[in-house]
Image: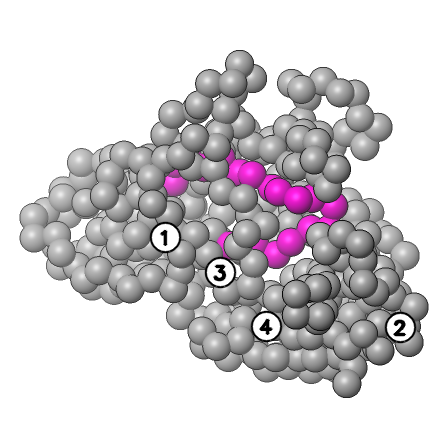
Amino acid sequence: MKAIFPLTLMGLTALGLTACGSDSDTAVPVNQTAVFSFAVSDAPVTEAAKVMVCFSGIELVGNGLSPQRFTIGSGQFTSDANDECRNLSGSVVPNTRGVDLLTLQGATAEALISAATVPAGSYGQLRLDIAAGSYVEKLDGSRVPLSVPSNQLRLQGPVLSAGGTFNYTLEFDLRKALVDANPSGNNNPATPDYLLKPTGLRLVDNSTVGHLQGEVSEGFLLNNQCTVNPADERVAVASIYLYSGADRPLLELSDNGGNNTYQPYASTAVFFDNSQTRYSYRLGYIDAGTYTVAISCDTQDDPDQPDDITFISAQNVTISSSSQPQTVNFGD
């Protein structure tokens, strides 16, 4: 069963000397261990109905020890495997958990490791293995393969102090990380149409982050010639960009592939919710600090090249370390 954060973490229950939850059999005194949890979350893209990523394993590497490896579905501290990930012949890929990242927006996350006991120390890398079967489902219902270079995402690892309980989340900013590798389309199912790159991925300590949400009034959208009331609610009507620091000038803001003065810390899209007749956005797992929140009616942003993005308004916000999101609205 999948676990959705926030989690109530278990205490340090290991009474023996083994780093529990790991495929490693490294013996470590219990007073030199830490409790580690790991989850994934997402900021959405505009051209996809699903972004299914097949997770198969997580490794903590370094710390003067053999890798602390966790294989999906192999122990009490990892999430269960499911049948979402299939190879080209249609067979389920074992020990994988397929996660649709588009279901994990804002402060929502899905746990892959829950309260595992590991040796304390400084880990140079966190490695996330991605198995066969990942795909992007477009708005028209077609599915195209999604691949990761070397089938592994490598990130700077965490520092886990002895006796501590640590809860980390990997935030996928898909507007930076998801790249169309086959824009012309060759209809070859063995050729990936999309690549998932480590660009835009943030590994954060949940105790040091906050969240952002907001609404955009229909009048504001109309006054700025944005799209309103789309026939398909999965189509974005505007874009939200977040920049480190306050009072960043609109003309100096860059899009995800641009080279202006200020590069976006994160970005997301504004969507219409017909059931509540509102236009809203969410951004999660943001490092505490002061930011500029900018809005644009432009929704297409190629992370590999500059796009003609016009920013129409911006506000300052201070993100605090809290599970309660800050709110920034645009319009009445």
Q: Nearer the viewer, residue 275 or 169?
A: 275
Q: Which of 277 and 116 is in front in this view?
A: 277
Residue 241, quarter of the rendered image: bottom right
Q: For mark 2, what is the residue?
A: 222
Three-letter amino acid code of the residue under disc 2:
Leu
Query: From this viewpoint, which residue is outermost toward the bottom?
Result: 332
Q: Earlier in the sequence, mark 1 or mark 2?
A: 1
Q: Give, as a single range, the part of the protein colored magenta.
A: 41-58
Q: How far apart are marks 1 and 4 (CA)?
A: 22 Å
Q: For mark 4, what is the residue?
A: 212
User: Could you tell me which residue is drawn at 64 percent across and 28 percent down?
Assistant: 145
Q: For mark 3, what is the residue?
A: 108
**Mark toward the viewer: 3 or 4:** 3
User: Could you tell me which residue is drawn at 71 percent across and 52 percent down?
Assistant: 234
Query: From this viewpoint, which residue is outermost toward the left?
Result: 16
**SS class of the residue under badge 3?**
loop
Does residue 268 appear left or right of residue 24 in this picture? right
Q: Earlier in the sequence, mark 2 or mark 4?
A: 4
Q: How crowded is mark 2: few (under 14 residues within 10 Å), some or many (20 or more)?
A: few
Three-letter amino acid code of the residue under disc 4:
Leu
Three-letter amino acid code of the residue under disc 1:
Ala
**SS class of the residue under badge 2?**
helix
